[in-house]
Amino acid sequence: MLRAVMVGCGAMSNGWLKAIRETARISERIEMVGFVDLDPDVAATRAREHGFTDAATGGDLSAMLGETKPDLVFDLVVPPARREVVETALSSGCHVLSEKPMANSIAEARALLELATKKKRVHAIVQNRRHLAGIRRAKALIESRAIGELTALHADFFIGPHFGGFRERWSMCCSSTWPYTPSTPRAFGCAAEKSSAYSTIGRTRPAVLIPAPCAHASRQTRV
C-alpha cells in the first residue's frame, strides 16, 4: 500500500479522487493520507467529500510531508507553482505524479529530471487519454491492418476556447499565439482538453477519419 498526499484540491482533484475510489486496482494500492491546498478549508472539504475522513489536511506541503511520511505526491497545482511543489516532494523522498505540463520551461524540466534522478525517485506526468475507448479503438484498427500499411498520421486541432484562470495568462510552450480569441480559431497542438478533433489516417484514398480527442501533434509524424 502506497501512502499518498494530494497537493492542489481544486475542481480537477475530483476526477483524480473519483478514479482512486472507484478503480479497484488503484484503491487497493493507494492510501490517501493527506490533502494540501493554499486554502486549508478547500483541502478539508475535498477530503471529506470523497470519504477520506482520516486523512490530514492543511496548507503547508513541507509540514504535511513531515507529518504523514508519504511514498507518493499527487501534484495538481497550477503550472507556476509546479517546480516548488515537485522539488519539495522529491527532496522529501517522494515519488511524484504531476498534472501536465511538466514544467514552465525546458530548463525547469531538466532541473526537475536531474533532481528526480539524484533522489532516485520517479517524476511522472499524467496522460490519461491514452486509455480512452476511442483511442484504444483507433489503436486496434491500426494494428489490425484493416486500412493497410500506415505511413503517416496527420492530427489538427481547430479550436478557440477560453478556459479562464491561469490559462489566459500562460505563455504556451507549443504556440506563440497564446492567448487567442474564439473569433480566430487556429490549429493548435496542445491543451485542447475540451475541443473536438479528428485524425486523418491512411495511405490510400479515401482516408480514414477517426475521432482523436487528444491528438498531440499538428504536424506529420512518421510511424
Image (cartoon, rainbow, N blue to C red):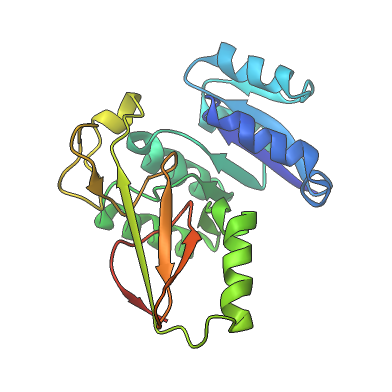
Establish if 17 lies above or below 158: above
Establish if 151 lies above or below 198: below
Residue 10 placed where, x, y %? 52, 24
Q: How many marks?
A: 0
User: Which residue is located at x 56 percent, y 77 percent?
Assistant: 142
* Side (left or right) of 130 relative to 195: right
Q: Nearer the viewer, residue 155 or 171?
A: 155
* Side (left or right) of 10 relative to 215: right
Residue at the limit of the structure toward the left, as seen here: 176
Residue 185 quadrant: top left
Establish if 29 lies above or below 13: below
Residue at the limit of the structure toward the top, as seen here: 41
User: Which residue is located at x 42 percent, y 63 percent?
Assistant: 199
Residue 170 placed where, x, y %? 25, 36
Residue 183 placed where, x, y %? 19, 32
Q: Which of 200 and 5 is in front in this view?
A: 200
Residue 204 quadrant: bottom left
